[in-house]
Amino acid sequence: MEFTYLDETQFVKFPQFTSSGIVAVGGNLSPGFLLSAYLQGVFPWYNADEQITWWSPNPRFVLFPQDLHIPKSLKRFLKTNDKLSTVDKTKLTFTQNACFKKVMQNCANIIRPDQESTWIHNEMIEAYSILHEKGYAHSFETWQNDHLVGGFYGVMLGKIFFGESMFSKVANSSKAVFVKFAQSFFENGGRLIDSQVYTDHMARFGAKNISRDSYLHYVKEYTQK
């Protein structure tokens, strides 16, 4: 599983896909490497004490605009929250790209019952922070009484948002900001939100599995200039 590339700034050609979902091991997390990966339906996922491992799972879990579903209880919550006074300390407010690295750090530190450790280690945080500085990676934040209580981050290329991770410290904080983002993203021409692999959380919003071949077709179509 060897890469074909010239240096860290040029396009990297990944090897052929495997049934396991693992595409290759090695390489680096430079902007050129990462962007090349996303444009080929590949993403890094590995622990801090391991070599960089590149994945392209089959099937792929994605959300299309026509499938976006907002649960009734969340609709009621958002409606009630919007009516709260700006001085109400329980009101949730939302921002974009206000504190990218802090969102990643919170995603790394949040306790998850099904995980013993996090793959969002310092090397990943630094690499994606550089992507953020270059305008490719974005964060979306939820605030309550001036405290960061929820959010998520990912990479946006063309008409696709490649979601990476989210965190929540207050009920509905990550769900609310995701809905705000998804509605705006789709209304402004976004065509697909990639959630990589199945999660109950994204399934509630209408995400579904599609084949890797179909996914790669959409990536090629929606990331063209």
Image (cartoon, grey):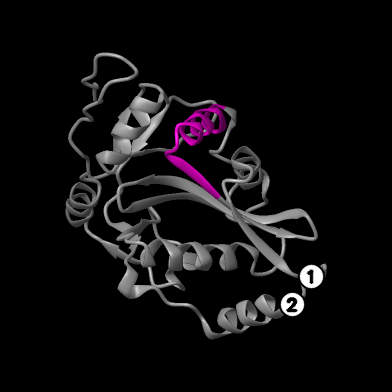
Q: Where are the magenta residues, as a range?
A: 123-139
Q: Quadrant of residue 13?
A: top left
Magenta-span inclusion, residue 18: no
Compared to 125, does 172 lie above or below? below
Along the line of sight, which residue is nearer the eye, 217 or 116? 217
Compared to 181, does 49 lie above or below? above
Identity, as a three-letter code, of the amino acid under mark 1: Thr
Badge 1 or badge 2: first in the primary sequence:
2
Give coordinates of residue 181: x percent, y percent: 49, 62
Q: Are marks 1 and 2 in contact (CB under 8 Å)?
A: yes
31 horizontally vs 217: left or right: right
Asked if one can make out residue 117 in the rendered structure from this viewpoint, the answer is no
Identity, as a three-letter code, of the amino acid under mark 2: Leu
Residue drawn at point x = 32 percent, y = 66 percent: 64
Along the line of sight, which residue is nearer the eye, 137 or 165? 137
Residue tagged by mark 2? 84
Residue tagged by mark 1? 90
